[in-house]
Image (tube, rainbow, N blue to C red):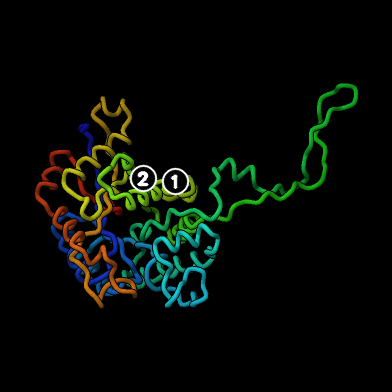
Amino acid sequence: MNESRVRLVVTGDDFGYCPLRDQGMVEAFLAGALTGVSLLVNGASADTAAQLARRHRIPAGLHANLSEGRPVSPNLGSRASLIGPGGFFLGKMGFRKALAEGRVLLPEVREELRAQLSRFLELLGQEPTHVDGHQHVHVLPGRGPSLKREERELASPSPGLLGVWEDRPGGGPSVQVSRGRAPAVPIPSPGVRQVFGEVLREHGVRYTRVPVEAGLHRCEWLEPQLRAFALAVEEDAQAAKEEFEELGLRWPDAYIGLSTMGKDMSVSRIEAAIEQAVGSVLSPEDALQGGRAITMELMTHPGYPSVSPTSGCGEGPDAFSQSWERLHELQTLLDPALHNSYQERSIKLCAFKDL
């Protein structure tokens, strides 16, 4: 690997999901293995998790949730587009299906995101250091295809008269004459990611997550269903960059974590993912000159396995949360070999607030 300095943010997702998960993340933070957490404010243990974050001064962001459990906003009733049977969100794939079919009302998305940010402020007494999306909902588009900036400008309805170029009699230069008002051009409605970015801007939150991982398509160890989902997330995230930039959001230079979740996490795979990420950011000139300092986020889900009924977001814990894979992540992050690797590679751990 290049002799580059890396400032690595190690984020523990799903803080507030259950007391056992929270316990593991606190242990990892106190051991120097985690540098921050993302809090589920509708999680079963959100209140006590917030108390832990305050007590131990754990940098905390919001894990914005539109897919699991019950909504935070009291204004979203059983007939809301985000809500399914039992008053719960539609689920990871159910939300995506409803969005693709045009059944999700984006004003409800805005309402729920605002409610979750307000709840975060109540619990922590301050705005989040960052906001990302539970199950990566924050990078999802709207129903229609996204348009690049230039395409959006061309598609915008003209406020004035439509200009048409005509030749002058006698061969003089062409002139522009009016032929009535410009026809309205249908424009896809803003997607979840645009609403997400606008709400973050309202609250002065600068940092988010863009889950684009170098070399992800070559990670053959991922199970087919997980690999397909990860690649779809990456495609959405890549498309979200321009909209996030326009809204003033920032994120680290590189991201890793889709290829190292659960049983797929190991010290060697984290090392390889970091190497791939650094190579994707540094130019050949940077590499020849010894590299430059880059920033990176490692997404993790450590903790002790969840148990009912004190887990989840209202529906109880899912299978992944109850499995040994969460403990496996915790043990890997605490492995001295990983911390030795950080030191050997001049990798400095930090939090979003330090960027």
Residue 212, label in figure: 2
Residue at disc 1, secondary structure = helix
Which residue is painted at 71% across and 47% down in the image?
A: 158
Disc 1 from disc 2: Cα separation: 10 Å
Residue 188, label in figure: none
Is 128 displayed left or right of 106 in the figure?
A: left
Residue 298, position as x, y percentages in the image = 26, 50
Other residues around mark 1 within 10 Å, as few (<14) / some (14–19) / many (≥20):
some
What residue occupies the far front of the structure in this picture?
224
Seen in the picture, residue 198 relative to 185 is either above or below; the reply is below
Seen in the picture, residue 34 relative to 282 is either above or below; the reply is below
**Quadrant in the picture for residue 51:** bottom left
Amino acid type, residue under disc 2 in the picture:
Val
Which residue is painted at 48% across and 45% down in the image?
A: 242
Kindly indicate whether the residue at mark 2 contacts the one at mark 1 (C-beta within 8 angstroms): yes
**Quadrant in the picture for residue 60:** bottom left
Closest to the camera, between mark 1 and mark 2, is: 2
Per the image, the residue denoted by label 1 is: 241
Tell me which label, 1 or 2, sits earlier in the chain: 2
Seen in the picture, residue 40 relative to 144 is either above or below; the reply is below
Is 8 displayed left or right of 185 in the figure?
A: left
Is 188 displayed left or right of 226 in the figure?
A: right
Amino acid type, residue under disc 1 in the picture:
Lys
